[in-house]
Image (cartoon, helix red, strand yellow):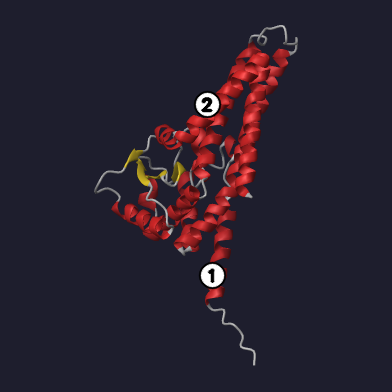
Amino acid sequence: MNQLRSFLLLFVLTLLFIFIGQQLGGNQGMVLALIFAGVTNFFAWWFSDKIVLAITGAKAVRPGELENVKSILQELSVKNNMPLPKLYFMDTPMPNAFATGRNPQNSAVAVTRGIVELLSDSELKGVIAHELSHIRNRDTLISTISATIAGAIFMLARMAQFAAMFGGYGGRDRNRDSGVGMIIIAIIAPISAMIIQMAISRTREYQADKTGAALSQDPLALANALRKLANGVKRTPSELNPVTHHLFIVSPLKASDVFALFSTHPPVSERIRRLESIAGELERNKYNIPKIVY
C-alpha cells in the first residue's frame, strides 16, 4: 500500500511539473516539460546513487577505514539476505546517514564523521539496519526521483519569478494576467512540491524504523541513536543541499529553520515513542508463557 501511495504522489509531482511548464510556455511548454520529466525520471532511476553521492560529496570508504561500520554493514546485509551495499563517508561534523540506489544490487550507504564519532556500535547497528530497510523497500529510488523532480520544480518556479518581474512570457495563447499567474506559480509550486515530498517520505521513515528495529533486534538502540542524532543536528549547522535533506535518517534542518515547517521527516519524539513501544512488546512476548488448559 505504501508503494502505491508513493507512486501516486510521484505522479502528482510530475503533473505539477508539467502544469508549470504549460503555464510558462503554453502547449509547447507543457510538451517540453513532459519530455523533460520523462528524461529526468529515467536519469534519476538509472543514476540515482551517483547523483546523490555527487551532490552530498560522499567518498567511497577505502580499505582499512571504518572497519567497525563495514563489519556491521556486512553482518546486517547477510542477515537481511541482500547484496552488500557500498559504503561511503562524508567528512562533516553533522551526525547523520543516508542510503541511496535504484535497487539492492546497486545501492550505497553513507555515514558522516559526526555519526561515527557520536554513536556506539549498537546504535550504529540500529541506524545501518534502518538504512538497509530503505534499500530493500526501494525507498531510496522513490526518494531520489522525488528529489530530482522537486528540484526541477524549484528551478521552474524561479523562472516564473523572473517572468513575473518582466511581465510574463508573451504569446498569442497567453492572457494579460500572465504576470499574476507567474507570481502564483512562483509561490505555490515550491510549497506544493515540498508538501508532496513530505507525504512521500514520512510514512517510509516510520516503516524503516520498524523494519530496522526488527533487523537489528534492538529497538532501543535505534531510539537512543535518533535521540543523539537529533541533539547533534541542533548543535551542527547543515551545509547540505536542501534537495537531499529527506534522504537522511534525521532531518538536517533545525527546528528554528523556516523550512523545518515542511520537514519530510516525522517528529523524532514520535519515532522514539514508537520504537520504545516495539521494545516493550518484544519484552512482553519474551515472557509470554501460554496458558495450559486442562
Looking at the image, can residue 166 be seen? yes
Above or below 189: residue 220: below
Could you say which is closer to the camera, residue 173 or residue 257?
173
Q: Amino acid at mark 1?
A: Leu
Looking at the image, can residue 268 be seen? no
User: Which percent across, then down, holds residue 95?
Assistant: 42, 46
- Mark 2 or mark 1: which comes first in sequence? 2
CA separation, marks 2 and 1?
46 Å
* Farthest residue, direction right: 176
* Farthest residue, direction bottom: 294
Query: Element at badge 2?
Result: helix
In the image, which is nearer the foreground, mark 2 or mark 1? 2
Query: Element at badge 1?
Result: helix
Could you say which is closer to the camera, residue 238 or residue 178?
178
Residue at 35% in and 50% down? 117
- How many residues crowd around disc 1 within 10 Å: few (fewer than 14), some, or many (20 or more)? some
Residue at 44% in and 47% down? 104
User: Which percent across, then down, holds residue 21?
Assistant: 63, 20
Query: Along the horizontal axis of the image, is 265 left or right of 225?
Result: right
Q: Which mark is residue 39?
A: 2
Above or below 248: residue 150: above
| Label total for image | 2
User: Which percent across, then down, holds residue 81?
Assistant: 42, 57
Could you say which is closer to the camera, residue 81 or residue 85?
81
Q: Amino acid at mark 2?
A: Val
Above or below 141: residue 42: above
Could you say which is closer to the camera, residue 245 or residue 105?
105
- How many residues crowd around disc 2 within 10 Å: few (fewer than 14), some, or many (20 or more)? few
Residue, disc 1: 282
Query: Along the horizontal axis of the image, is 70 left or right of 103?
Result: left
Residue at 50% in and 47% down? 250
User: Which percent across, then down, holds residue 126?
Assistant: 45, 57
